[in-house]
Amino acid sequence: MLGKLMKYEWMATWKLLLAANLLTVVMTLLAGWMVHIMDYSSGRGMVEFVAVMVILTYVGSMFAVYVGTSIYLIYRFYTSTYGDQGYLLHTLPVDTHHIIIAKMLVSALWMLINSALIYFSVIFLFASSEDIFVSMMEGMVNVFTFLGAEKISAFTIVMTIVAYIFSLFAKVLKVGACISLGQLSANHKLMLSFAWYVGIYLVERIFQGIYFGLQLAFNVKASHMDYLFYYDSQWETTLIGGIISCVVFYVLTWYMMNQKLNLD
């Protein structure tokens, strides 16, 4: 049943989000072409002006696609779970756990695809200009050398990726939990959902500030080895925080959806 729910969720979202990500690819190719033209158009004011405008449009489109994808997935979760479609969804012989997991995995996958495309898009854009790409590579090498990155193990890199994935799951589940908690209101569900999100965000920032403050208090004499140690241990903090957040937000979402469902 979980597979069927994921397939249904994917089929309901792929057309719009695929088009948005294709826009990312098209704008990347166009902006890369403009950067290449600028390398060979010194002194040609109109050409450079058009190229700059295209690049600015590219930056705006990247932002719009990323934010738009997030908003659409939030809208999709709300309407399909607590909106008109929710009446049908909750009458199906489907376990609540399967509903939450299916929506979390599909949403996280789309956010991962979107983030990866933007990441490689920026690399491609820098690579379109040989001078910029060389300067960027030299700067990265200098930073990694300063941090002692050559001593970072493959295990650390893998676990950093795992920690990122769990943090992504946590972000998706946090939105679901806030929307679910918002159903406690009779007349202002969306407003209460937003209030819950802001409140949770502030609490997270407070705990994060306390944690980093304690780190600074116990590492007053910083050296480049301290930075290396920080990077080696940072994935542990991110992973533990991500797992705890996933559990808390998942339980909240399940409880509200299973015990406090209100579709009025």
Image (tube, grey):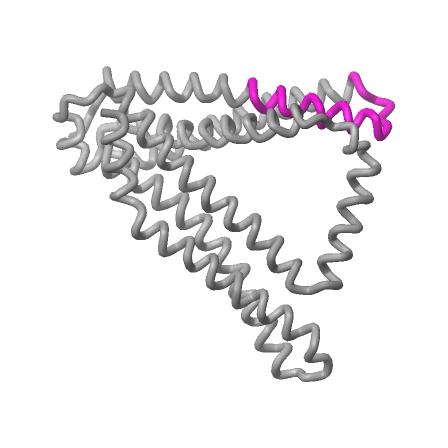
Answer with left or right where residue 63 lies relative to residue 51: left
- Boundaries of the magenta span: 218-240
Residue at the image position 53 percent from the left and 64 percent from the top = 29
Q: Is 180 located above or below residue 36 in the figure?
A: above
Does the magenta portion include 213? no
Answer with left or right where residue 193 lies relative to residue 53: left
Residue 203: image x %, image y %?
52, 24
Residue 249: image x %, image y %?
40, 21
- Labels in figure, total: 0
Q: Nearer the viewer, residue 175 or 188?
A: 175
Q: Give the image quarter of residue 227.
A: top right
Residue 263: image x %, image y %?
18, 29
Residue 197 visible to an observer of this rendering: yes
Main SS, magenta region, reads helix
Q: Give the image quarter of residue 207.
A: top right
Residue at the image position 25 percent from the left and 43 percent from the top = 12
Q: Give the image quarter of residue 256.
A: top left
Q: Nearer the viewer, residue 89 or 24?
A: 24
Q: Nearer the viewer, residue 65 or 126?
A: 126
Answer with left or right where residue 108 lies relative to residue 46: left
Assign the C terminus to one quadrant of the image: top left
Please, which residue is most extreme toward the front here?
Answer: 154
Residue at the image position 41 percent from the left and 37 percent from the top = 109
Answer with left or right where residue 146 lies relative to residue 24: right
Residue 43: image x %, image y %?
72, 83
Residue at the image position 16 percent from the left and 38 percent from the top = 84
Does the magenta portion include 222? yes
Residue 199 visible to an observer of this rendering: no
Assign the N terminus to one quadrant of the image: top left
Q: Is 49 located above or below residue 96 in the figure?
A: below
